[in-house]
Image (tube, rainbow, N blue to C red):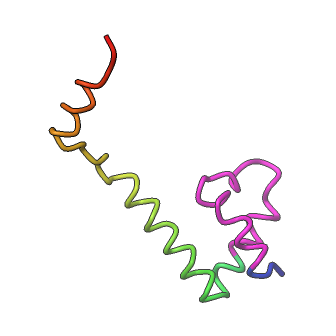
């Protein structure tokens, strides 16, 4: 059975959907079993998923207009 360290190594692949690739069935199954049986790793996976969801919908920060004007004046022609 997978341990927490192995789970963490595969977490990024799972979040990116890479564990769905052909030939990774054993890893995917072990990952899913560990996720279902380990509350700490389930909480970690939920936290990572929440962060990814937030980043997907978060707006890019807008630069303040005075900063934009200052930068435009400093650029060589």
The residue sitting at 79% across, 81% down in the picture is: 3
Side of 3 where 37 appears, left or right: left
Task: Give the x, y percent position of residue 39.
Answer: 60, 89
The residue sitting at 65% across, 78% down in the picture is: 35
Examine the image and state in which quarter residue 13 appears. Answer: bottom right
Q: Nearer the viewer, residue 62 or 53?
A: 62
**Which quarter of the image is occupied by the C terminus?**
top left
In the picture as drawn, the residue positioned furthest to the left comes out as: 65
Examine the image and state in which quarter residue 64 appears. Answer: top left
Give the extent of the magenta segment. Answer: 5-32
Side of 8 where 71 appears, left or right: left
Q: Is residue 31 above or below residue 17?
A: below
Task: Give the x, y percent position of residue 44.
Answer: 57, 78
Q: Nearer the viewer, residue 27 or 58?
A: 58
Q: Is residue 72 above or below residue 41?
A: above
Q: Is residue 48 above or below residue 23?
A: below
Q: Main secondary structure of the magenta part?
A: helix
Does the magenta portion include 52? no
**Which quarter of the image is occupied by the N terminus?**
bottom right
Q: Is residue 66 above or below residue 57?
A: above
Task: Give the x, y percent position of residue 36.
Answer: 64, 82
The residue sitting at 49% across, 66% down in the picture is: 49
Q: Total marks drawn?
A: 0
The residue sitting at 15% across, 38% down in the picture is: 65
Task: Give the x, y percent position of residue 10.
Answer: 72, 64
Does the magenta portion include 29? yes
């Amino acid at each position: 059975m997978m341990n927490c360290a192995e789970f963490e190594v595969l977490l990024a692949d799972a979040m990116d959907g890479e564990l769905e690739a052909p030939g990774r069935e054993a890893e995917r199954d072990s990952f899913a079993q560990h996720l279902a049986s380990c509350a700490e790793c389930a909480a970690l996976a939920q936290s990572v998923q929440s962060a990814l969801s937030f980043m997907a919908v978060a707006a890019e920060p807008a630069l303040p207009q005075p900063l934009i004007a200052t930068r435009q004046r400093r650029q060589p022609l």
